[in-house]
Image: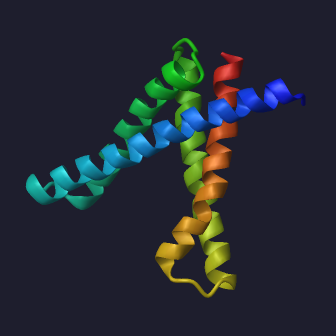
Amino acid sequence: MNFINIKKLILLFSKFSLVGVFMTFLSLVTAYIFLEILHTPLFITYALNYLITIFISYQLNRIFTFKARHTTISMILYYFVYITGMLLGMLLLWIFKQFLPFRNFILTLCVLPFTMASNFFLSKLVFDKV
């Protein structure tokens, strides 16, 4: 991999991260509104918030990060990427919980670099292939 490709990959990862920060903020705000103001049920709120924010994330990353066209298969694969990332995160949480003496909140932070890298590279594959 040459310097130009590495620079391009860093730029893509930076854009992907920026979308991730925005989506985290958006999901926290919407969760607060639905749970604390509208008093919707926890699990319904969590599931809908997760599904909707993945859809918005798909659109933002498709347009802003990867500059790719929309296809139904790319959207389905993008959801699959994030479900895979969630399962990876749960597996890593379980492993870390067995071997690391940290509190649960710290363990969730330990998982982030792995799930973020996985989501980025798998998303890149999705948008590169369609």
Residue drawn at x 66%, y 56% as measured from the top left: 114
Quadrant housing the N terminus = top right
Horizontal side of 3 relative to 11 (left or right) equals right
Vertical comparison of 18 with 63: above or below: below
Q: Which residue is farthest top?
A: 69
Question: Residue 46 versus residue 15: which sits nearer the camera?
Answer: 15
Question: Residue 123 versus residue 5: which sits nearer the camera?
Answer: 5
Locate residue 49, reporting x and y percent: 32, 45
**Residue 80 in view of the camera:** no
Horizontal side of 30 relative to 69 (left or right) equals left
Residue drawn at x 51%, y 14% as measured from the top left: 70
Horizontal side of 39 relative to 11 (left or right) equals left
Residue 17: quarter of image: top right
Residue 123: quarter of image: top right
Locate residue 31, reporting x and y percent: 25, 52
Residue drawn at x 24%, y 60% as measured from the top left: 42
**Residue 19 in view of the camera:** yes
Vertical comparison of 76 with 38: above or below: above
Tag count = 0
Question: Residue 60 versus residue 52: which sits nearer the camera?
Answer: 60
Question: Residue 22 versus residue 51: which sits nearer the camera?
Answer: 22
Quadrant housing the C terminus = top right
Residue drawn at x 50%, y 22% as measured from the top left: 64
Locate residue 128, reporting x and y percent: 70, 20
Horizontal side of 55 relative to 86 (left or right) equals left
Vertical comparison of 39 with 110: above or below: above
Locate residue 30, reporting x and y percent: 24, 47
